[in-house]
Image (spheres, rainbow, N blue to C red):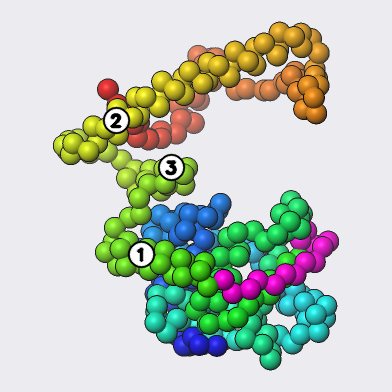
Amino acid sequence: MSAQVLMKTLDLSHEDWLKTRKLGIGGSEAAAIAGLNPWSSPLRIYMDKVSDEVEGIPDNERMRIGRDLEDYVAKRFADETGKKVRRLNSMLQHKEHTFMLANLDRVVVGENAFLECKTTNSYAKKEWEEGIPLHYELQCLHYMAVGGYDCCYIAALIGNEKFIWKRIERDEETIQNLIQIEHNFWHNNVLKQVPPEPDGSNEYSEILKKKYAYSEDSQIELDGSFVEKVERIDVLKDLIKDMDTEKTQLEQQIQAQMEFNERALVGERLITWKTCTSNRFDSSSFKKDYPELYEQYINQSSYRRFVIK
């Protein structure tokens, strides 16, 4: 191991552990910064790092089970491979790139390697059988970068019914690319407090809505570079409208052929057009019949509407 110990974690409280994570980039954040984590984004990581608040993910039963099963996964790996593993109980820090941090589940005794333990649901079974989810692989490569490890073993309990373990070799080219991405994020975004560029994700939109939740009666002048962006939005709106029309037209052609039939086969594809029943609250009639009661249950909400004229 070539990393330095930033802090011992054996008696560290969860809140202090979260505070320490703000000092750098952890392995579970690496893929998000690279834009390759389906559950997170560069902006979310950025907002967490620059905020004074300690906002961990709210604990839930699934997370508790995952922590409890970590011991089982580690023991299962040791039993199946004959390798000895042990806890490190330390937060590691890259000696040169001190913003890179690592919390390892276990280290492998007698090897320059570590073990990463995962628990997941049965829906991920096929993905694990075909390979390793990319965001987990990048997490392990991040740890290899921090500690100078030669390889990593990753073991997963899938849906409490299947155990899989795999070996990830050190990939120096990918590691150097990852270091560069994280270096750029840390020095040009976090330290300078400059948010990452918009990435088109729903999460980026939700964070913007939360950060700028209300509007003020004021006006700014955007520079000339935004003229092209506005014009491009106009073009995209027309394209989307045309594509939606084409999609609807094709659906109508299929529906016209299906008539009253609920299902249709085309090649190996199954098409369904089922009758669905839903119950909806008639708020207009309720307001008319019980106006006073209606007013008691009105909750006013506000949102910002984005319009280009």
Which residue is under mark 2? 230
The mark nearer the N terminus, 1 or 3, is 1
Q: Identify the image quadrant of the C terminus.
A: top left
Residue type at mark 3? Gly
> Which is nearer the eye, 52 or 243?
243
| Residue 265 x %, y % | 81, 21
Which residue is under mark 1? 184
| Residue 68 x %, y % | 71, 72
Under tag 1, what secondary structure?
A: helix
| Disc 3 packing (10 Å; few <14; some 14–19; many ≥20) | few
| Disc 1 packing (10 Å; few <14; some 14–19; many ≥20) | few
Residue 12 in view: no
Position of residue 157 in the picture relative to residue 8 (left or right): right
Residue 75 is tagged as none
The mark nearer the N terminus, 1 or 2, is 1
| Residue 110 x %, y % | 69, 91
Q: Which residues are magenta?
A: 158-171
Residue 149's place in the image compared with 276, above or below, is below
Residue 199's place in the image compared with 22, above or below, is above
The mark nearer the N terminus, 2 or 3, is 3
> Which is nearer the eye, 157 or 239?
239
Count of picture labels: 3
